[in-house]
Image: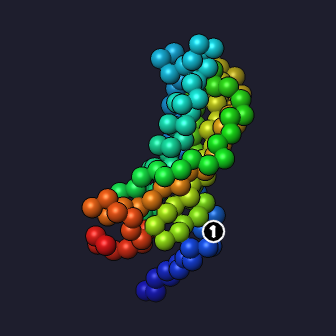
Amino acid sequence: MQVETESRSPQTPVPDRDWLSMFEMVFPEKANHYSTLFGGQVMQLMDKAAFVVATREARRHVVTVSAEDVTFLAPVKVGHLVEVRARIAGIGRSSIRVETQLFSEDTLSTDRTLCARGHFVLVALNHQGRPVAVNAGGDA
């Protein structure tokens, strides 16, 4: 049996991959004074999804080093279902760039709206907390 492996260059985007989806209901304690999801909560949800995707790719500890091009497109209302989607957008030596999208769904009508999008960069770490190659085996 022959196994095909993928070689990656730090400059080359990763081929199209499946999206990871995470869901959460919006309750009042996560809302601002306009009864919409607080922007900090939006970023937290997107960062969490990016973290899961990067951790699954690196199979190492990862930390967020930047949030880039985060755009808030529409408010998310209390009582709506949020879907956060994330996928690998690119891989460097020790960094992973993750594309994220956040959708809001009115569960009573199934209306769905793209409310935010952005990119997060996470870095793989060894057990001493130092950057390490994403695909490094063991504890480099």
Image point 63% across, 68% down: which residue?
Answer: 13
In the shown orientation, is residue 95 left or right of residue 74? left
Q: Provide residue 7's location: percent of width, then percent of height.
A: 53, 80
**Can the viewer see residue 86?**
no
Q: Amino acid at mark 1?
A: Pro
Label 1: how many residues lie within 10 Å, few (<14), some (14-19) or many (20+)?
some
Q: Provide residue 38's location: percent of width, then percent of height.
A: 57, 24
Is 101 placed above or below 3 here? above
Image point 40% across, 56% down: which residue?
Answer: 62
In the shown orientation, is residue 6 left or right of residue 131? right
- Figure quadrant of residue 37: top right
**Can the viewer see residue 30?**
yes
Image point 45% across, 59% down: which residue?
Answer: 123
Which of the image's four quarters has the N terminus?
bottom left
The one of 17 and 34 positioned closer to us in this rendering: 34
Q: Provide residue 40's location: percent of width, then percent of height.
A: 54, 31
- Residue that carries the numbered disc 1 in the rendered image: 13
The one of 109 and 47 positioned closer to us in this rendering: 47
The one of 70 and 85 positioned closer to us in this rendering: 70
Q: Secondary structure at mark 1?
A: loop
- Figure quadrant of residue 140: bottom left
Image point 64% across, 42% down: which residue?
Answer: 70
In the shown orientation, is residue 77 left or right of residue 132? right
How many numbered discs, if any?
A: 1
Q: How was the colour assigned to the protein in this rendering?
A: rainbow
Q: Provide residue 76's location: percent of width, then percent of height.
A: 64, 25
In the shown orientation, is residue 86 left or right of residue 61? right
